[in-house]
Image (tube, grey):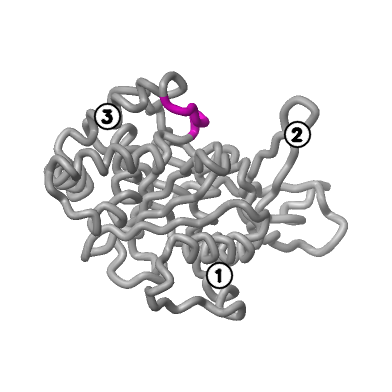
Amino acid sequence: MDYLLNYLDEYSHFYPDVWKKYDFVRSRKGKDIPDWPDWCYCPLSVAYSIEADVARRANIPKSQIVPDIGNLGALAAWRMNKTVYRFSPVLLDALSKSNIKQIPVNALYNMPSWCVYIDVGNFDWGIPNLRGWFAYLDWDIKKEEPELRFTFDTDKGLVPCMINLSNPYLSGCLEDTIKESLGHLSLRQMIIVPQREEFHHFSKFISLYLAALLYLCSVDPDVTPKNTRSPHPNYPYRTIMRLKVGFHPEIPKNSTEIHQKPYIRKAHWHMYRVGPGRKGTALRWINPTMVGFNKPI
């Protein structure tokens, strides 16, 4: 995982003092620059001004700035906590079958840190030569809406990806993302726009990434050792903390639901209301449950 620290060194080499710039901008949060939610480390629209200024001084071409915005955004947020998660293949197999169609945005606010990095391990995530991926929430200052950001870590470099969260359904979010992306492109550019029937395939592909991220945002996820790191607003951790996910699931062996033949209830998501007026939402992943076994006499 040392290559993740190398990313921080490489980008700070290309963009000198960029991390100090982030620290300075965050110190002005809500003062002489617009405020943003605490679950966002630094909006990319604000980060762009940082990057553009540093790039201008370092004579970096503008064509390089655009793809680096999302990458720098991920690294800037991840460097504060430096956590790496590796999922159990058994859990990932169950999560891949959960088939997420709606995105519970409120649950994403419970991300364990500003940005997480998930190591792919030996599981097939559908992207060739993928080593891992960053995930974090961005805040669109103009629209005052959250956006989900991924940065895929491949053996050829970092590749940013954005998902608009303006629609409750994943397919709608993907459509809105394409429309917004088209609005930022020149009419002279030749592009291929996915057809509606292709969204189903892409939704199924991205569903695994969402499921893994939502699991980390759920209530009492199976993470070992327990993550005791709280991201400091100014001082990043120096070392990487490696965490295992889903390797020690607690599966109830006894149940009082004995009205039918014993069976194993499949793993599934459960959403419930919490907080004042029960207006908040909490997401819980329910492991496979043995129902009807060891029937009490």
The type of residue carrying mark 2 is Lys
Location of residue 108 in the rendering, given as x and y in whole percent from the top left corner: 55, 43
Q: Which residues are magenta?
A: 33-39
The residue beneath circle 1 is 204
Q: Nearer the viewer, residue 73 or 58?
A: 58
Location of residue 172 in the rendering, given as x and y in whole percent from the top left corner: 63, 63
The mark that comes first in sequence, 2 or 3, is 3
The type of residue carrying mark 3 is Tyr
Q: Quadrant of residue 179?
A: bottom right
Is residue 39 depicted above or below 85 in this figure?
Answer: above
The type of residue carrying mark 1 is Lys
168 magenta-colored: no
Please report the residue visible at 50 percent of the width from the left and 38 percent of the height from the top.
141
The residue beneath circle 3 is 237
Q: Quadrant of residue 122?
A: bottom left
Q: CA distance from mark 2 to mark 3?
A: 35 Å
Residue 279 is labelled as 2
| Majority secondary structure of magenta residues | loop
Please report the residue visible at 65 percent of the width from the left and 47 percent of the height from the top.
252
Is residue 281 depicted above or below 211 in this figure?
Answer: above
Please report the residue visible at 50 percent of the width from the left and 31 percent of the height from the top.
36
Location of residue 9 in the rendering, given as x and y in whole percent from the top left corner: 15, 42
Left or right of 99? Residue 30 is left
